[in-house]
């Protein structure tokens, strides 16, 4: 977290059913929509939930049993979209991408003209670090008349997200990634096509988008907000507005490039796939990744992100989000080298 975030989140929380809090939230809405280059008429929803709550809410509000949904399933979070569709009984087909394999445009084109009504994708599936080509996918949806729903939980502020040029109808993100805030707040932006579908599923109560949209006119949520996180969000979005979205993306790109260049000097590998600036997946061909994770955390208080399932002992992920600089990566490389030399 950044110092100003820590200061704000460490203060006494105000009562939030006030005009002052409402004005703050409406200003956050304006800055958030600008950062996405959202189309005219787009709307903002602030949820008190994790990023998965936003994924759940988008599916339950915008899709129904009458849809035919295409899911890009290339990791844990692509699988999560698939599971959410299963939960709500929404017909879907998954485009499966095996571990360490890149998205294949030519293969994906087999889904064109198949009467799909919506596409669900994680801009970056955080479990693998793979970055999907939103320009191509947006064009695919435009050609096929599909609603384009993008989970940008990890990609927001790290990778290029542009609702207008990429034909995105709904963007979802959360507080605990590049915004570097406490977990507990999820942000949603809905374009015109998505707004027309609000209530299509008619299942949600706590996540009823229509309720949130109506209350956001006065800058309020329908239920109790994650007040401290929303106050810190306002400060972070102000910074994004002042620095510009291109500068924020470049900041994360520079961190990712710096670390990846240094990593090439170690007997470790990166998958040969397009990678997000949000994180770098690190493959351990000769050492057990879990053992390295445990050693770094126990000896130095350095926490990388472990992987689950069959990837548990093969891959760790190094984040490039939040209050980090080159000295942090220099320290990590030094400690990694020490562990690998043992």
Image: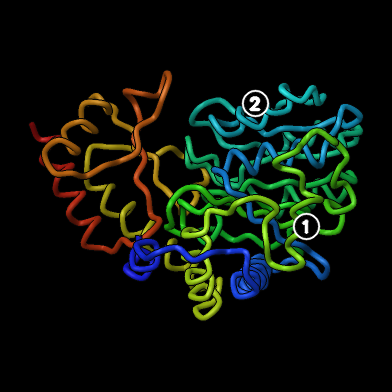
- Image quarter where the C terminus lies is top left
**Of the pair 263 and 73, the residue shown nearer to us:** 73
Q: In the image, residue 139 lies at what x, y percent?
A: 79, 52
**Of the pair 120 and 65, the residue shown nearer to us:** 65
Dot 2 alpha-carbon crowd within 10 angstroms: few under 14, some 14 to 19, many 20 or more: some
For this orientation, the residue located farthest to the bottom is 242
Q: Is residue 89 left or right of residue 267?
A: right
Circle 1 is placed at which residue position? 213
Q: Residue at x 45, y 63 (%)?
A: 13
Q: Is residue 186 visible?
A: yes
Q: Residue at x 59, y 61 (%)?
A: 160
Q: Residue at x 61, y 47 (%)?
A: 123
Q: Residue at x 48, y 42 (%)?
A: 129
Q: In the image, residue 330 lies at what x, y percent?
A: 20, 56
Q: Is residue 286 visible?
A: no
In this picture, is 166 found above or below 293? below
Q: Secondary structure at mark 1?
A: helix
In this picture, is 249 found above or below 119? below
For this orientation, the residue located farthest to the top is 310
Viewer-nearest of labels 2 and 1?
A: 1
Q: In the image, residue 12 lies at what x, y percent?
A: 39, 64
**Of the pair 170 and 128, the residue shown nearer to us:** 170
Q: CA distance from mark 2 to mark 1?
A: 34 Å
- Image quarter where the N terminus lies is bottom left
Q: In the image, residue 125 lies at what x, y percent?
A: 54, 40
Q: Is residue 230 left or right of residue 168?
A: left
Circle 2 is placed at which residue position? 96
Q: Residue 192: which quarter of the image?
A: bottom right
Q: Is residue 19 left or right of residue 234?
A: right
Q: Secondary structure at mark 2?
A: strand
Q: Earlier in the sequence, mark 2 or mark 1?
A: 2
């Amino acid at each position: 977290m950044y110092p100003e975030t820590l200061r704000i989140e460490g203060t006494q929380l105000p009562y939030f059913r006030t005009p002052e809090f409402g004005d703050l939230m409406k200003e956050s809405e304006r800055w958030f929509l600008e950062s996405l280059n959202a189309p005219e008429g787009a709307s903002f929803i602030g949820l008190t939930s994790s990023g998965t709550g936003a994924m759940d809410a988008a599916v339950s509000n915008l899709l129904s049993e009458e849809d035919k949904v295409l899911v890009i399933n290339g990791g844990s979070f692509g699988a999560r979209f698939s599971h959410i569709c299963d939960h709500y009984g929404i017909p879907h087909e998954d485009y499966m991408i095996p571990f360490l394999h890149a998205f294949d445009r030519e293969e994906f084109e087999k889904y064109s003209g198949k009467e799909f009504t919506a596409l669900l994708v994680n801009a970056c599936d955080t479990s693998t670090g793979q970055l999907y080509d939103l320009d191509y996918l947006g064009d695919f949806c435009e050609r096929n008349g599909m609603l384009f729903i993008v989970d940008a939980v990890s990609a927001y502020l790290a990778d290029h997200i542009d609702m207008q040029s990429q034909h995105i109808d709904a963007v979802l993100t959360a507080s605990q990634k590049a915004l570097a805030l406490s977990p507990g707040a999820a942000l949603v932006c809905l374009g015109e096509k998505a707004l027309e579908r609000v209530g299509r599923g008619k299942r949600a109560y706590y996540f009823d988008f229509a309720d949130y949209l109506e209350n956001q006119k006065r800058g309020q949520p329908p239920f109790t907000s994650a007040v401290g996180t929303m106050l810190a969000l306002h400060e972070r979005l102000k910074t994004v507005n002042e620095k510009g979205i291109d500068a924020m993306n470049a900041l994360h790109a520079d961190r990712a490039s710096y670390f990846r260049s240094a990593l090439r000097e170690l007997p470790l590998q990166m998958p040969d796939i397009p990678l997000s600036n949000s994180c770098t997946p690190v493959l351990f061909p000769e050492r057990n990744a879990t053992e390295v994770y445990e050693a770094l955390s126990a000896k130095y208080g350095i926490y990388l992100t472990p992987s689950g399932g069959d990837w548990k002992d093969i891959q760790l992920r190094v984040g490039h989000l939040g209050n980090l600089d080159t000295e942090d990566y220099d320290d990590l490389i030094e400690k990694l080298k020490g562990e690998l030399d043992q």
